[in-house]
Image (spheres, rainbow, N blue to C red):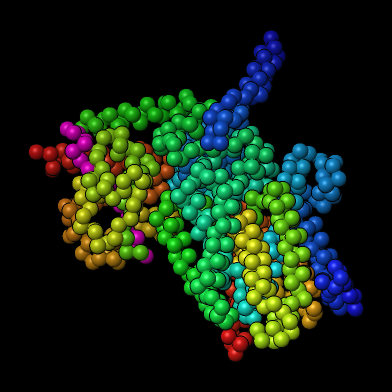
């Protein structure tokens, strides 16, 4: 058992050997996927050429362009947004004590989608940077609206309110796509599918800093996650400041999902799948659970992106479509297997 | 002597290929090759098709692909029955989702796209100079002319345009006053029980405007300054065009009667409610042929107008 105590025990957590082993295995799989992602694609090159390019001896300017400007940023962004969606889902599930909670089920992704579709259809002259900003703002606004309308109700009320708000926001988005210019609507649909093909180094920088900062915030909250999962009364009895913790959990989960959605569009079901995959792998402490969940989210999105861009190349399948194809059946299975908890 | 001439010609060609020029693109002024040799087109029926007609040097294009079908170039297949292999052009992905690495592998010297394209401009510009057409600023024919200008094929464009202008003038001469005839494109949408009215429908609208036909008052009022507008099926009887056009898409299994079936699925006996249909002036056209950016598409629409409007109007309706 590895015990970490920091800041005069303000942060302390335990890692079971099995948890650490799984994290190490996950990191090795991630490295394998990174290598695969860097060497596979429509531009033919082998792993040796990728390595030569990485160490500065690129066989050609094209190799350098493909590896440094396309594949590496894309690979890193896939991992980072996967981790963010997964962390967001894990925190929402803990907050609502409902294993069905996911950023796309509580309106966050739909808020971003509405904001971006509005920009593409109504303000087409606005640059891509402002689309990301508006996506972020749209997510926050919808999450805030759900929080305000749901009030301090139970988790089911929060989820149902989220589903209702998501449906409303999606209806407005659909209306804009239906009545907007067809070419712009097609362009907006490409974003709505959740694609990582436009990832750049500036996205990597923003996401890296944000993921690091949010991960620290998540780990600080980890200690309170266990009592929180026992319910309101038990948490208060164990000395948890429930209101403050709930607000912090909601804000950090919304921030993570909003940021990821702003960069790549909505990637459905990652926040739902990753925490459940972790739960089926191992029973462990909250900090270890969060780290493993982030890793699972990163692996899931990286795998989906790799498959989506290579399987039928040059036809590109958006990573969001693949995560939804995997996630939707999983969601149905979850509904059927846990209906007693709903 | 022969070798000197060959050397001279090689030098002239090399110099002309190496030259660049500055053009105004959507994102600002950009430097492009004076005579592009390896162009990638990021929209099929509005870039690849006109470039094919202009005989530009295209090496890659996006296309369409339906389940189980070979990829095809919208417009080029419908109007010329040519595919990627026939043209020696590489398929670089589907419209609005091109494969950026495939484009890189083609080593293009010019990429052409529209300002509504979903590909990252930053990535495209890292591969090659990228000319972005501003769809909001330029009309159909202006965009066609811009494509010719940036691909150094203006001579071909001018020759085809002169022929087109002659045919337009020919039809104008057959009509007493084209502005007295209202012509419109409208399409039923059974899924939403609506009808889309068009002000701007590619080649169709270009020809209608060039001949001088008018847009029906109801269409003008509903569409305003936009390119199109949707009305409820309940407003069907308000459609006031002298000649009402519609389109069908054989590529998706449509036949010429599919448009009528679509209306019928919303309102049986709909034809009685629309004067143009009641009077035998409702005309379905092939969709890609009447919309695409192409002189052959313009010719197709001209032929339809000549047959259905110019001749018939003078025969039956002009007193």
Residue lying at the far left of the rendered structure: B319
Please tell me whether residue B28 is drawn above or below residue A169 in the rendered image. above
Direction from residue B49 to residue B111 in the image, left or right: right
Please tell me whether residue A27 is drawn above or below residue B107 in the rendered image. below
The location of residue B54, given as percent across then percent down, is 49, 32
The location of residue B280, given as percent across then percent down, is 19, 52
Q: Nearer the viewer, residue A235 or B52?
A: A235
Task: Check if residue B256 falls in the magenta segment.
Answer: no
Q: How many marks?
A: 0
Q: Nearer the viewer, residue B299 or A8?
A: A8
Q: Nearer the viewer, residue A160 or A275?
A: A160
Q: Nearer the viewer, residue B312 or A79?
A: A79
Q: Locate the N terminus of chain A and report the quarter of the image it occupies.
A: bottom right
Residue lying at the far right of the rendered structure: A1
Residue B196 seen by the camera: yes
The span picked out in magenta is B175-191
Q: Quadrant of residue A37?
A: bottom right
Q: Locate the C terminus of chain A and report the quarter of the image it occupies.
A: bottom right
The location of residue B120, given as percent across then percent down, is 61, 46
Please tell me whether residue A172 is drawn above or below residue A227 in the rendered image. above
Q: Quadrant of residue A334?
A: bottom right
Q: Quadrant of residue A281?
A: bottom right
Direction from residue A189 to residue B164 in the image, left or right: left
Residue at x-position 70% and y-position 52%: A206
Please tell me whether residue B131 is drawn above or below residue B271 in the rendered image. above
Residue at x-position 70% and y-position 48%: A202
Residue at x-position 54% and y-position 50%: B95
Residue at x-position 31% and y-position 51%: B197
Residue B308 seen by the camera: no
The location of residue B79, given as percent across then percent down, is 43, 44
Residue lying at the far bottom of the rendered structure: A340
């Amino acid at each position: 058992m590895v015990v970490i105590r920091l800041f005069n025990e303000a942060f302390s957590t335990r890692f079971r050997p099995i948890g650490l082993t799984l994290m190490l295995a996950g990191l090795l799989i991630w490295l394998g996927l990174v290598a695969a992602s860097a060497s596979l694609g429509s531009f033919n090159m082998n792993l040796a050429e990728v390595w030569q390019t990485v160490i500065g001896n690129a066989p050609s300017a094209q190799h350098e362009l493909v590896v440094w400007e396309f594949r590496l940023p894309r690979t890193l962004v896939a991992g980072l947004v996967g981790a963010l969606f997964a962390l967001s889902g894990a925190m929402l599930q803990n907050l609502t004590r409902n294993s069905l909670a996911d950023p796309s089920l509580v309106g966050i992704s739909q808020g971003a989608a509405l904001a971006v579709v509005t920009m593409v259809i109504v303000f087409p002259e606005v640059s891509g940077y402002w689309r990301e900003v508006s996506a972020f703002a749209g997510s926050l606004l919808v999450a805030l609206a759900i929080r305000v309308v749901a009030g301090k109700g139970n988790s089911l009320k929060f989820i149902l309110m989220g589903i209702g708000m998501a449906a409303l926001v999606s209806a407005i988005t659909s209306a804009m796509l239906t009545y907007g210019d067809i070419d712009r609507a097609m362009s907006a649909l490409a974003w709505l599918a959740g694609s990582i093909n436009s990832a750049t180094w500036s996205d990597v920088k923003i996401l890296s800093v944000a993921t690091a900062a949010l991960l620290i915030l998540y780990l600080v909250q980890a200690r309170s996650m266990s009592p929180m999962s026992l319910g309101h009364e038990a948490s208060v009895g164990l000395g948890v400041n429930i209101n403050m913790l709930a607000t912090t959990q909601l804000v950090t989960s919304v921030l993570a999902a909003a940021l990821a959605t702003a960069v790549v569009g909505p990637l459905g079901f990652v926040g739902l799948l990753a925490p459940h995959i972790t739960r089926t792998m191992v029973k462990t402490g909250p900090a270890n659970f969060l780290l493993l969940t982030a890793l699972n989210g990163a692996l899931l999105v990286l795998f989906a992106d790799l498959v989506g861009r290579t399987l039928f190349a040059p036809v590109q399948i958006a990573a969001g479509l693949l995560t939804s194809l995997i996630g939707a059946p999983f969601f149905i299975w979850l509904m059927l297997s846990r209906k007693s908890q709903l | 002597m022969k070798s000197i001439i060959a050397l001279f010609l090689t030098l002239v060609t090399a110099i002309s290929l190496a030259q660049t020029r500055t053009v105004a693109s959507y994102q600002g002024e950009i430097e492009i090759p004076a005579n592009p040799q390896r162009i990638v087109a990021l929209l099929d029926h509005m870039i690849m098709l006109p470039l094919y007609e202009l005989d530009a040097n295209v090496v890659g294009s996006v296309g369409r692909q339906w389940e189980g079908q070979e990829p095809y170039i919208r417009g080029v297949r419908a109007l010329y029955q040519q595919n990627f292999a026939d043209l020696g052009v590489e398929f670089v992905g589907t419209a609005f989702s091109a494969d950026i690495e495939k484009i890189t592998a083609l080593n293009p010297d010019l990429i052409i796209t529209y300002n509504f394209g979903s590909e990252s401009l930053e990535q495209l510009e890292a591969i090659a100079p990228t000319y972005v057409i501003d769809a909001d600023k330029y009309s159909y024919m202006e965009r066609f002319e811009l494509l010719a200008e940036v691909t150094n094929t203006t001579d071909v464009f001018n020759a085809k345009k002169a022929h087109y202008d002659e045919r337009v003038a020919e039809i104008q001469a057959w009509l007493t006053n084209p502005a007295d005839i209202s012509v419109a494109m409208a399409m039923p949408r059974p899924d939403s029980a609506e009808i889309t009215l068009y002000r701007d429908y590619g080649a169709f609208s270009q020809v209608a405007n060039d001949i001088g036909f008018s847009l029906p008052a109801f269409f003008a009022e509903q569409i305003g300054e936009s390119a199109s507008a949707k009305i409820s099926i309940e407003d069907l009887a308000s459609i006031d065009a002298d000649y009402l056009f519609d389109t069908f898409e054989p590529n998706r299994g449509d036949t010429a009667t599919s448009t009528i079936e679509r209306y019928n699925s919303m309102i049986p006996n709909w034809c009685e409610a629309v004067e143009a249909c009641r009077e035998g002036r409702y005309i379905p056209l092939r969709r890609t042929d009447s919309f695409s950016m192409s002189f052959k598409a313009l010719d197709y629409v001209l032929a339809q107008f000549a047959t259905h409007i110019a001749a018939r109007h003078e025969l039956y309706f002009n007193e």
